[in-house]
Amino acid sequence: MCRWLAYSGTPVLLGDILYKPAHSLIDQSLHSRMGVETTNGDGFGIGWYGSDAGTPAIVRDTGPAWNNRNLQEIADHVRSPLFFAHVRASTGAAVQQTNCHPFRHGRWMWMHNGAITDFHRMRRDLCLAIDPTLFSLLEGSTDSEVMFYLAITLGLDQDAPGAVARMAGLVERMCREHGVEFPLQMTIAVTDSERLWAFRYSSQGTSRSLFYSSRADAVRALHPDLEFLRGVSAETRLIVSEPLGDLPGVWNEVPENSCAVVQPGLDELLSFAPQPAGPAGGPVPLTRWTPRCSLKCKSVRNRLLGLLGGACLQIETATKRAPAARSAFPHRGPCGRLRSSWRACWGGRRSLSPRCGPPMTGGRPRWKYWNLSASRRRPASWPVTG
């Protein structure tokens, strides 16, 4: 798994948090005490907001954090009131820059520690639930990035805790449909530059470690000799995968199934549970791309043919103005055979008449296409719906 930290409060040099503590994140990248792996050297990333509080800056690399000179240079010269830092231990995805955290979309920033069980089996279904306008923005191959764009799809802009809960509910539902008993393991940090949310949850009830710091004024009263605390506000807060030191009274464990909210004024610690994403929890977009007919096929052969035909039907609305594209997609006729040409279903020369299809009248079919989810004809006036 990985280790991460999130800082919110008085602007500080990144290096004061990343390098100076006794058990800093850089030390954790080599000597983690609470992680699944001791070494987290499959890449790192930092993201921070400047004084204008616009979109965050992101720097990521595939090498280990403990010997990266560019990271040291940035940390010694960049001051920020809100930043993320992450060191990665891959759970199977490729070691590449686009797979390193944090991830960014507009003003939003996201990082994750954990995994979706059997993600290689779930990846296609989960990606199909992402809004089509966002899908092209996926750059890497990790479950973490897919979770981020699912949360955006499900309303991150309007309700961050609710969107993450719906994302978790969608992941668990899809995974359990494929026989995965404990689908999800996650500690997540997400921010919009004004508030910071941190989530700790797992399907099994044994989540990865997560801690938050006590209020700075309380820590200052306990440890007046700490030089770092002299210049920071009482609202300064750190959320970390594991404590940066061993001083008593500084670190508090985030409870299981919880969401911590760091915001101007009073911070909050809320309970967290996945919510259904679908008819009860809001529509999952792009349902028109989901093959409908394959669910009613009774044999493996017909199921595969139904999958192909159903997918073609769903593409119909996107290809109404592209006859050449339509002709490239075969589909299944009512007798179970695979049509040799999509164009034959839309009318054309008699020589293109399909082997299994409707009677031809004047070189054109009497109906527009077959309803593949039932062996009957559908009038041409019926629209294609998702």
Image (cartoon, rainbow, N blue to C red):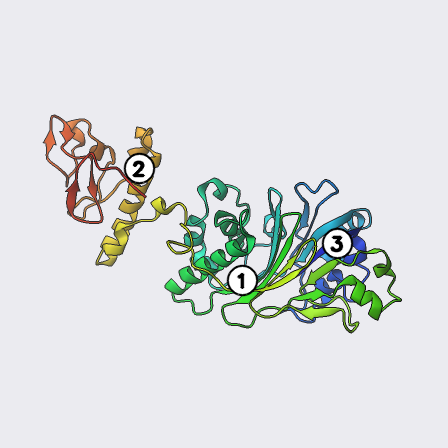
Question: Pointer 2: residues within 10 angstroms few (<14), some, or many (20+)?
Answer: some
Q: Identify which residue is drawn at 44% across, 42% down.
A: 132
Amino acid tagged 3: Gly
Q: Farthest front residue?
A: 265
Question: Residue 240's spot in the image, x, y percent?
Answer: 69, 63
Q: Which residue is mark 1?
A: 115
Element assignment for label 2: helix
Drawn side of residue 133 relative to residue 37, left or right: left
Q: Identify which residue is drawn at 27% across, 39% down.
A: 384
Element assignment for label 1: strand
Q: Which residue is mark 2?
A: 316
Q: Which residue is mark 3?
A: 9
- On screen, residue 298 above or below 334: below
Structural distance between the alpha carbons of marks 2 and 1:
36 Å
Question: Residue 124's spot in the image, x, y percent?
Answer: 42, 52
Drawn side of residue 141 relative to residue 323, left or right: right
Amino acid tagged 1: Ala
